[in-house]
Image: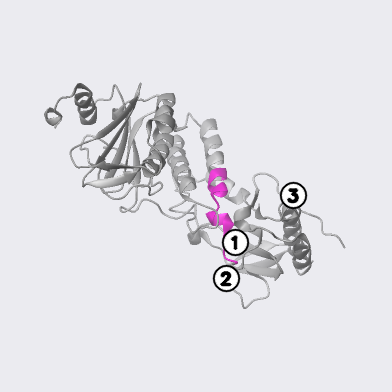
Amino acid sequence: MSVVPIIPHSPDLYVCDRAYGDLILFDDCTSAIGQLSNGQDNVNYYLNRPELEYHLPFSTTTGTCTITVEHAGPDLSAPQFIKLVPVDIKGMAEFVKRRCATYGIGGFTTDGFDSLVDYLENSGDRDLMYRPDQSHNMWFVTVSITGHSETNLKPGDTDPVVANALRGYAQEFLETHSDDIKLKEHFSETLERLLIRSWQMKRRGSLNWWSPQGASDEMTYTCDADLGSPALVDCAQIQWQGLGPPSDTITIVPGVTKFISQNTCNLAISAAVALTLTWSQIQTAFSTLMNTCVKNPIHSPQGGTAYFAPHPAFSGCGTKVRKDLTGLNALPPHANLTIFASNASSELNCEWQAARQGRSASSCK
């Protein structure tokens, strides 16, 4: 008896990627799917209760193919059970088999993602990631096909496509409610958090989209209108042509700032202690900072600062610190990057002008 695949419909999604497995045999997945239940009635699948017949997560393996069914969503909102129809799980696995395992690779699909979208649109002044509403269903299910022995991959929590999907819905909702100042502020913050978190996440990683962010020992990205409005095209020129070869290094010493400029966009590299950085590190941090502040979909282009320390080295920069905006930890502690425009009113701009004119920057302090 053939299994009818269940195709995910928006907002549910699917992913096929070699990160979830390679050289998976199609016939092995067919056999693994055959081990799943054909039950057609709703069943309560209890979370983290392996002693019960129906529980999540669970998996089955045949040869090169492992099928895993898992719950996903913020820990604080976890219900006791999730209602599922067993044969629907089988249909979801069949879909991933046909869409992904046909090509020998793994992947996953979701069911119930609409609960997160509904919560996102009705969250008011609650915070999607930090203060989930326990009375609201924020959980969904993933069915994965992998070629790995580990079964606790949790793609619904750790795959960046989930954070990106939520970010897309936050963006749409923000655009349709642009006249509501309170909602606009709330969703702007949620959107920025999801944006940064999606850059941090990686497939088969351990970082999830809903956990708290912004520890003081992580890298922070801040946007500041006082640093002017550099043009994205000019910053892109620095990104692709103004930096050195990735493996080459540059030494930065305290009190001496390295400036790289392209028309309206200026990059300052500084450090509170003597450091040797690779251009690859600088490229990663610069790209993240540029996408956060200059290319931000919420506000007009702004300058900003990236630092891995409680405060940036320049006292005049980063006054609007957003510690929840943590990005890739590309730079070591005490290193700082700042993007600013030529018309920025800051101590940093004074130092830049002094460097261009070959004079001391001591008068800028």
Mark 2 or 3, nearer chain start: 3
Q: Quadrant of the N terminus?
A: bottom right
Q: Which of 146 and 152 is in front in this view?
A: 146
Amino acid found under the numbered disc labelled 1:
His
Mark 3 or 1, nearer chain start: 3
Q: From the image, tell me which residue sits under label 2.
A: 48
Q: Locate residue 44 relative to residue 155 in the image: left or right.
A: right
Q: Is mark 2 on a helix, strand or loop?
A: loop
* Residue 161 located within the stretch drawn in magenta: yes
Residue 345 seen from this side: yes
Dot 2 alpha-carbon crowd within 10 angstroms: few under 14, some 14 to 19, many 20 or more: some
Measured as percent of width and height from the top left, residue 280 is found at 40, 43
Q: Which residue is drawn at 66% across and 59% down?
A: 144
Distance from label 1 to label 2 (Cα)? Answer: 10 Å
Q: Is residue 335 shown above or below 81?
A: above
Residue 71 — which label?
A: 1
Q: From the image, tell me which residue sits under label 3.
A: 7
Q: Is mark 1 on a helix, strand or loop?
A: strand
First to last magenta residue range: 151-165
Q: Which of 85 and 334 is in front in this view?
A: 334
Measured as percent of width and height from the top left, residue 72 is found at 57, 58
Q: Is residue 318 shown above or below 310?
A: above
Q: Nearer the viewer, residue 42 or 32?
A: 32
Q: Residue at x 20, y 29 (%)?
A: 351
Measured as percent of width and height from the top left, residue 156 is found at 58, 55
Q: Residue at x 58, y 46 (%)?
A: 117
Q: Locate residue 307 relative to residue 365 in the image: left or right.
A: right
Q: How many labels does the image show?
A: 3
